[in-house]
Image: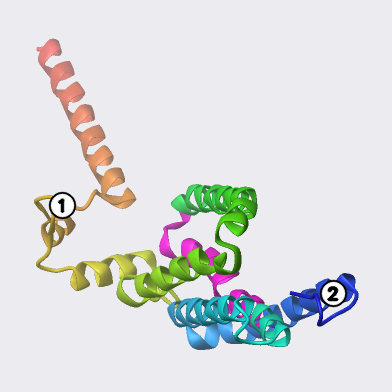
């Protein structure tokens, strides 16, 4: 992307790094104003358009300067949405006792995907040439559609509120003969309910011991 536009590749890398930092600052300003779901949709849509512009530019329809601008745009849109927001969504979607496991699994999956992208991209580039960013565009389009149709807004909500919202949204649907609404009426007992049940059992045990003692004394 830097050939014919910037003579020194180090300058181009530094420029992209500076854009990355500035876009991260913009993300900090937008994070609590626009909502998680909205930023994911804007980010994936902007990155999708950037990928299309890159592919068209690599095919010679646009200049190298336009391709460089599309790369900068891709970085910006990534940093305002798909970069930081998924980490917030995972933390906000689960109760505190499940956050550690959910974040660990998400982190492992994220870096595993990064590893495979880095491993296979040279082969993709060799096979597809100017269309190397096509697969990324497809994934971004699917990401936008998923966020639009399924992803709930997690900002300012609790896991219980998210569960209630998703149950309401999927009311009347059945998945593999499972009634979504019916499942909520048989929710697992809470910690307080467990403690009350154990206390009741303890009281019954004490009462039983007293009765046995009285019977033996007679």
**Magenta highlight range:** 73-96
Q: Which numbered circle lies on residue 14?
A: 2
> Could you tell me what secondary structure mostly forms the magenta stretch?
helix
Q: Is residue 144 magenta?
A: no
Say above or below: 45 vs 213.
below
Name the image quarter holding residue 132: bottom right
Looking at the image, is mark 2 or mark 1 nearer the viewer? 2
Q: How far apart are marks 2 and 1 (CA)?
A: 56 Å
Residue 104 showing in the rendered view: yes
Dot 2: element: helix
In this rendering, position of residue 191 left or right of residue 37: left
Q: Which numbered circle lies on residue 76?
A: none
Dot 1: element: loop
Residue 151: x and y in percent read 36, 71
Q: Residues within 10 Å of mark 1 (few under 14, many from 20)?
A: few
- Upstream in sequence: badge 2 or badge 1: 2
Q: Which numbered circle lies on residue 186?
A: 1
Say above or below: 206 vs 145.
above
- Identified at 14% across, 12% down, the residue is 217
- Identified at 67% across, 81% down, the residue is 67
């Amino acid at each position: 992307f830097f050939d014919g536009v910037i003579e020194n590749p180090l300058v181009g890398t530094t420029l992209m790094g500076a854009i990355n930092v500035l876009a991260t600052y913009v993300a900090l300003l937008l994070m609590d104003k626009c909502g998680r779901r909205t930023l994911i949709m804007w980010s994936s849509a902007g990155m999708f358009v950037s990928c299309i512009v890159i592919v068209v530019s690599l095919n010679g329809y646009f200049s190298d300067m336009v391709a460089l601008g599309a790369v900068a745009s891709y970085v910006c849109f990534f940093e305002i949405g798909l970069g930081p927001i998924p980490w917030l969504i995972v933390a906000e979607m689960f109760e505190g006792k499940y956050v550690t496991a959910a974040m660990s699994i998400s982190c492992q999956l994220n870096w595993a995907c990064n590893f495979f992208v880095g491993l296979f991209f040279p082969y993709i580039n060799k096979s597809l040439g100017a269309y190397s960013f096509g697969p990324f565009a497809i994934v971004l389009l699917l990401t936008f559609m998923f966020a639009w149709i399924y992803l709930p807004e997690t900002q300012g909500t609790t896991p219980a509120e998210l569960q209630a919202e998703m149950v309401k949204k999927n009311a009347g649907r059945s998945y593999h003969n499972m009634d979504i609404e019916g499942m909520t009426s048989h929710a697992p007992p809470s910690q307080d309910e467990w403690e009350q049940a154990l206390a009741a059992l303890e009281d019954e045990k004490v009462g039983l011991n007293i009765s046995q003692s009285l019977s033996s004394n007679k």
